Image (spheres, grey):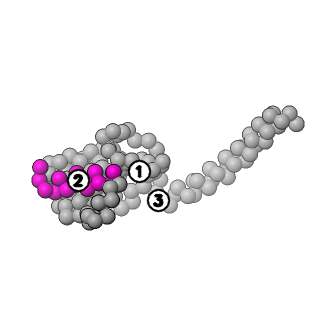
Amino acid sequence: MDNLSSRLIVTTLIRRLNLPIYLFIRVEHKIVYTSAYVFEIDTVREAFKKAKIPFYVQTETLAGVKEAYPASPASGFGTRWHVFVLGEAESKAKTVLSALRVSSNSDATPFPALKPGEFKKYFWKALIIVSPIVATLGYALYRAITGK
């Protein structure tokens, strides 16, 4: 195992365990790729393995951030993945990424079917439609419970 791989493992463990030693070690993990598509993350993972670039993949869902990509590879609505490398391996990782046929991650969004600004528009439309229905059902439930 080379020095870069061992540093990535140690610093990841230190971060996961929230050890106080992390305050004294300056390690930079850089996000080099983000995608909402599993097949693109698999492509990037395989390319980094072949290039012997140490990395880890973090899953982000609507509920928050999770780690350990292989544990739950099935995507749900609003899931995206981030590929991290150590700061010193960032330039090599970007070189490998430039040769791959994957989408640019500049517009990576947890809702791949929507453009970045469209979610707010659809959210408010849905809220306007659903709110009266929920209020009516709440009122009907209140009347049923109280008997009035």
**Three-letter amino acid code of the residue under disc 1:** Val
- Span colored in magenta: 1-17
Give the camera-side residue of 98 and 88.
88
Image location of residue 124, percent across then percent down: 62, 55
Residue at the outermost front position: 20
User: Dot 3 surroundings within 10 Å: few (below 14), some, or many (20 or more)?
Assistant: few
Q: Kindly identify which residue carries mark 3.
A: 116
Residue 140 falls in image quadrant:
top right
Q: Please name the residue shown 19% across and 64% down the image.
A: 88
Residue 146 falls in image quadrant:
top right
Mark pair 1, 2: CA separation:
20 Å
Q: Nearer the viewer, mark 1 or mark 3?
A: 1
Image location of residue 109, percent across then percent down: 42, 55
Q: Nearer the viewer, mark 1 or mark 2?
A: 2
Q: Please name the residue shown 79% across and 39% down the image.
A: 142
**Three-letter amino acid code of the residue under disc 3:** Pro
Q: Please name the residue shown 29% across and 60% down the image.
A: 21
**Three-letter amino acid code of the residue under disc 2:** Val
Task: Indicate whether residue 7 is drawn in magenta.
Answer: yes
Kindly tell me whether residue 128 is visible in this rendering. yes
Q: Please name the residue shown 25% across and 56% down the image.
A: 11
Count of numbered circles on the image? 3
Provide the secondary structure element on which disc 1 rests: strand
Question: Going from the N terminus, do you reach mark 1 or mark 3 first?
Answer: 1
Q: Which mark is residue 10?
A: 2
Main SS of the magenta part reads: helix
- Quadrant including the C terminus: top right
Mark pair 1, 3: CA separation:
20 Å
Mark pair 3, 2: CA separation:
36 Å
